[in-house]
Image (cartoon, rainbow, N blue to C red):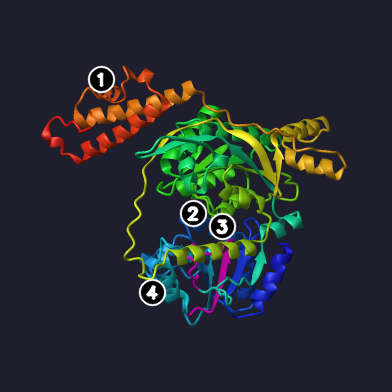
Amino acid sequence: MRLRQWQDDGLRRFLGTNRDFLVVATPGAGKTAFALLAAQAMMDRGEIGWITVVVPTDHLKGQWAKAAARQGIKLNPAFTNAKKRTAPDYDGVVTTYQSVAADPSVWDRMANQPSRPCLVILDEVHHAGDSEHLAWGPALFAAFSSVYRRLMLSGTPFRTDAKPIPFLRYDEERRVIPDINYDYGMALQDQEVVRPVVFPALDGEARWRLASEHAVAKNLSDTDPRNISHALSAALDPSKDWIPSVLRRANDELSLIRQDTPDIGGLVLASNRQHARAYAAILQEITGESATVVTSDAPSASKRIFDFASDSSRWIVAVQMVAEGVDIPRLGVIVYATRTRTELFFRQVVGRCIRRRGDDDELCARVFIPTIQPLLDPAARIELTVQHVLRDEEERARSCHAVGESKDGGENRPPVLPRRVEVIGSSQSVHPYTINSGEAFGERILLHARRLGQEAGLPVSAEPSAIVRLMRLAGNQTGDGRPWPVVKEQTLVERKKELRGVVNRKVGHLAFLTHQPHRNIHRRLHGAFGEDNIEQATVDTLNERLIILDSWIDEAKSTSRGQGEIWPSM
């Protein structure tokens, strides 16, 4: 195969040394191919007789085995700890970090046979330090500390707790030292490695309330950083208005792209299984076509990903499972509909749609994001070097970690109790701008550019912000097209109707707990505010009704249900 420049440089460096080696490279750059080429070269030179590849998920085992087979390397993806040994006609095995952690002695014996020196490839090695799996790091040391060579791969070699990852080298300031670094910005300059990507940013109003407080209504773009999680809970709720309107916009864009490239697909990244299934139902209603749903608890998850990667259906909906490492080159559109907001995770998600499918792939990928700063900032600097991002993220993690460590070790700090968030509603989305190479392009100029592109005979899927940039290069004047669309505010009638609906739901809940008729509960609420009925309630008194109902419900829950009728005190 023809080597890319970074692969050629990295291969010479790797073969010219005998120490641990870290490759930091963007998704789509060819990390897997690089590792297999390195393994093949070592086998040809007689340096190794065995290969062990460790990956984060079961799905990736099959993906690695297939990629290795294309290069004549026979890896067994079906080996398990219970089998102890594998057939001698394999060149090695593919396993997961979880399997190694379950029994490091199996892997120590397999990787340290004197007659066959072993190369261990640790794919997405940052998972070895995942704070949710603290045993993985020590298990790797126990299993592979004595092997002949170790090759580590990652696009984001960084732990959120700023603790070191096994086998990586760090400088004096505890920052990762890669042996070869090839990030998205570098790959984009090479023009034949990855696709460009733009970020349609979608605003809208989110409405929620915390227990014992009045309801809050904020545009996503205006939300205080401390309340972003609450706002996203409202915006991403499939029963409200925002996320269904986003899915319709994304599907419209996918339809345009498929006019030129009919098999291009889209990914919706959801926060949980319930949202994933609900989003798939919305997409089926929009498109008339079933969407593939992938969750980690489904035994057929890997097969569903493989099937989607090879067919021409429109949408796959997943809960983090395809955030990294999974190869679906036909993905061209992503809807970022998860509450996870770290820059490293965001970059991993973007990596799913930037893989080019050959020299004739001219697609510009689209990633739809909410207009919240933790996503707008990394979208604007997506082309900056990963090393700079790593340094920034590591500084933030160390700072947060230090703040959390008091002189008494944190033992005397009172526990921070989570506050209950209640989703009220959300508005339809609006599209104020698209981010392309760090610049925001307003919707009006984008519509104008798309019309000009069609008049000039450009493909209907041509990205409007790219057309604007071409117009500038040609000397044409392009303003930003303000005013941008604004979020439609609720009328007083709409706001009160929504709050009355929440009051009625809470009254129903309380009636169930206390065995009291709905009308009795409503009558006590009317009397509390001197109102004859709920239609006379103001926004303030509706919010106060909610606070009273919260207290009654909490009191009813704390009272035994076996005491007959329960009626909370007022």
Q: Is residue 328 visible?
A: no
Q: CA distance from mark 2 to mark 3?
A: 12 Å
Residue neighbourhood size for the residue with mark 1, other residues' Cα within 10 Å, grouped as few (<14), some (14–19), many (≥20): few
Q: Which residues are magenta?
A: 146-166
Location of the N terminus (image quadrant): bottom right
Q: Residue furthest left?
A: 563
Q: CA distance from mark 2 to mark 1?
A: 55 Å
Apparent side of residue 98 relative to residue 389 in the rendered image (left or right) = left
As shown in the figure, which amino acid type bears the numbered disc 1? Arg
Q: Are marks 4 and 3 in contact (CB under 8 Å)?
A: no
Q: Which residue is mark 1?
A: 519
As shown in the figure, which amino acid type bears the numbered disc 3? Lys
Q: Residue at x 68, y 49 (%)?
A: 357
Q: Earlier in the sequence, mark 2 or mark 4?
A: 2
Q: Which residue is mark 4?
A: 105
Q: CA distance from mark 1 to mark 4?
A: 68 Å
